Image (tube, coloured by chain):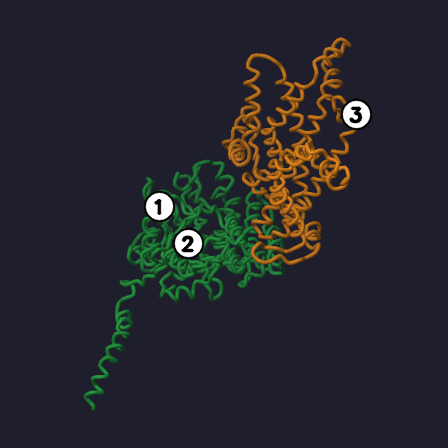
Amino acid sequence: MGTDAPAVPLAITHYLVETTTMALALPRQRQRMSARRRREALTFYLLLSPFIFGFLTLTLGPMLASLYLGFTSWDLLTPPKWVGLDNYTQLFTTDGDYIQGIKVTLSYAATALPLGLVASLVLAMLLNRNGPGIYTFRAIYYMPSLLVGISVAALWIWVFDTDHGILNQFLGAFGVPKIGWLTDPNWALRSFVLMSLWGSGGPMLIYLAGLKGIPQQLYEAAAIDGAGWWARMRNVTLPMLTPTIFYNLLTGLIGVFQFFDVSYIMTQGGPPILQGDNIVGATRFYMLKLYNDAFGNHAFGYAAAEATILFLFILAVTLVVWRTQGAWVYYEGSVARGK
Amino acid sequence: MKRIHRLRLIPVALVVFGAALPTAVSQAAPAASAPRVHAAAGVTLRFATFFDPNEKKIFNSKILPAFQKEFKGVTVNLEPIPDTRVKSVTQIAAGTAADVFNLGDGDVGWYADKGALVDLVPLAKQQGFSLDQYLPGTLTIGKVGNHQYSLPKDYSPLAIYYNIDMFKAAGLALPKAGWTWDEFRQDAIKLTKNGVYGASLPGDWPRAVDAVIRSLGGQLDSPDGKKVLGYMNSPATIKAVQFWIDLFNKDKISPTPSQAAALNVGDLFASGKAAMNLTGVWPAADYKTSLKFHWGVAPLPTGTKRVNTICYAGFAVSKSTKHPREAFGLVKYASGPVGDAVWQSIGRLPALKSVIAKANLMKDPVQSVFLREAGFIDLPEDTNGPAAAQGVGDTLHEGLTLLLNTPGTSVAQVLQIEAKKGQKAIDAYYSQ
């Protein structure tokens, strides 16, 4: 559910880096820039200035402030007090709920993300054909992804209702006993994973665009060579689709670690489980814990430390995935893989 | 000479008399009949509330005109706030807090401890507004030490609604003041039959369970609100919580909250699915008009002592207000005789003795029970101090939810864990 696309398209970032480098590091070359090139650069920065201003004041500024606040004890109403690494030490040594937040979020990410990637790819393949009513089907499968957050949570509360929910009534018709989807600690997290399929329409649409972009002559050549469905799939479709898979994986990763709103509405982190000498929430996601620490306990410095760790973790995972693309992502027109 | 001196004294006497006249008149006249008028043209107050549409309408039509009669020229802008944990806190931090705002019962201690609220006692004295006119119990939540930080908008202690027809059919005596938790349990067991529960109980609601625990001799935290360990896990508290949990998991006289939600019938008592209902005054107005069976209200049962609790919403003045006099004036009208009578007219329980007397509520079979129970209000332990909401309320809620959802779990073990968690939260707060 709810994946975030990168805030700045890569092309703009590339252009920014290029022009800034030129402007700062190569003064002689800059002097030799033609008037037309200077005008172009000026127009570029002028058009981009609302974003740059917003990014500096509303994103980068708060991020730096949050980084600092992570080293403080701050309740929002009185001045922050410097506590050094205390928040970070406490998180990893004495806060059982924090460790549970990491466990729950990683479990969810490890199941919901691959499941969502596969489900949306399968859907896209099923819908990548011509026939009567295909556009209607595509719209039907895509539309749920337009509904997000609270409205979806409210809907799924009814779907998962133990006694009156449509899911248990459906399963009951096959003799399956009632399941406490949101109240049974063994099922609550699985319910969220199941529910995450609701948002498959978004990635599906991107896969569909990727599938449409695969040149037909590749399939024709494969058919002439006698390739069957699986061979075409393995040697043509999947390799040609790897940039799309990579994009969906990356945006999915960033989104899945920030899962929050649905658990906040549907379970509030519960149901509680007795785990050794601690009681923890079966669906106490990392972001839910962070929110509760900030706005429930007014421990904004502590929550800022959690936010910093999450940011660094997502950044590290993203960079690792980014570095692996050379090994498995094929860009059309490149001489070798990953180039 | 003497005559001339006397003549000279006449203008002096006239001046003295003229100066003294207004004071003498004001002292002789009853304060209520001639309220002082404060000219404050150009002052605008921001009033952040969680009024529902009907309350907003009634505030604008009845309370605001009365306020503006005394505070001439003051404009009041109502601002909706969904809760007091997020929006008000961020507004205060940003220096954009409303002058007057609604405050929930769990937040007064924290806001006061952070210096975000104005002590209303001096302002009340300045404006001749006596806090003695309130029922003492209704001031407990808004009070920290000798300071009063919030005055009630509406409140309620808890009581037991009971279905008279079901009691009679089961051959049971009707509940009355002084009945015990054991009698309640025995009645509920006998009333649980044919798909009807003996009672509908708020299983995981810390505010209600706190009252039960204390009436049975337990305690959740120390009187100063700084100790949870040794209180929440004390033998008396464990025994009381065990009694409460057994009502659900052993006696099965009430559905647990998740079981009740699954029944999908809303109010179990109103729908005839429960013979008793432990709650506040809130459903009484609807019950009066909609219930087709005979019903009554009984005080909360007693254990080793008679204790009740309070659920509360109040009005507070922000420390950052530039107009404390006008801001308190607004609180005075929203909570005092004018406001209290208005809220009472839409079914709220009044906090002022004069409003109770004027509406003759001690003769009302429902409201009188709640008003008598207000005499037994003790500060809820999840509001006892700035960190009690987390240290007591959240931990007790988590423990109760676990115990109700997983029958057979050790109450002592759960309360031991939650007491440690609560103590940690409170220690963390005070070590800041």
Q: Nearer the viewer, mark 3 or mark 1?
A: 3
Q: Quadrant of residue A27?
A: top right
How crowded pointer 1 is (Cα within 10 Å; few <14, some 14-19, many 20+) is rated as few
Distance between mark 3 and mark 2 Cα atoms: 67 Å
Q: Colour of chain A?
A: orange
Amino acid on which the number 1 mark rests in the picture: Lys
The colour applied to the residues of chain B in this rendering is green
Disc 2 element: strand
Q: How far is disc 2 from disc 1 in space, using C-alphas?
A: 18 Å
Q: Which residue occupies the extreme bottom position in the image?
A: B1
Quarter of the image for the C terminus of chain B: give it: bottom right
Q: Which residue is mark 2?
A: B45
Quarter placement of the N terminus of chain B: bottom left
Q: Quadrant of residue A31?
A: top right
- Chain for mark 2? B
What percent of the width, then of the height, locates residue A319? Answer: 74, 37
Relative to B51, is A59 on the left or the right? right
**Discs 3 and 1 carry the same chain letter:** no
Residue located at (71% from left, 29% from top): A246
Is residue B4 shown above or below B317? below
* Observer-nearest of A316 and B5: B5
Residue under label 1: B57
**Which element type, helix, strand or loop, lies under badge 3?**
loop
Residue carrying label 3: A337
Q: Amino acid at mark 2?
A: Leu
Disc 2 with disc 1 on a shared chain: yes
Q: CA distance from mark 3 to mark 1?
A: 69 Å
Instruction: Give the structural element (helix, strand or loop) at label 1.
Output: helix
Chain letter of the residue carrying label 3 = A
Check if mark 3's residue and mark 1's residue have beta carbons within 8 Å. Answer: no
Nearer the viewer's eye, disc 2 or disc 1?
Answer: 2
Q: Amino acid at mark 3?
A: Arg
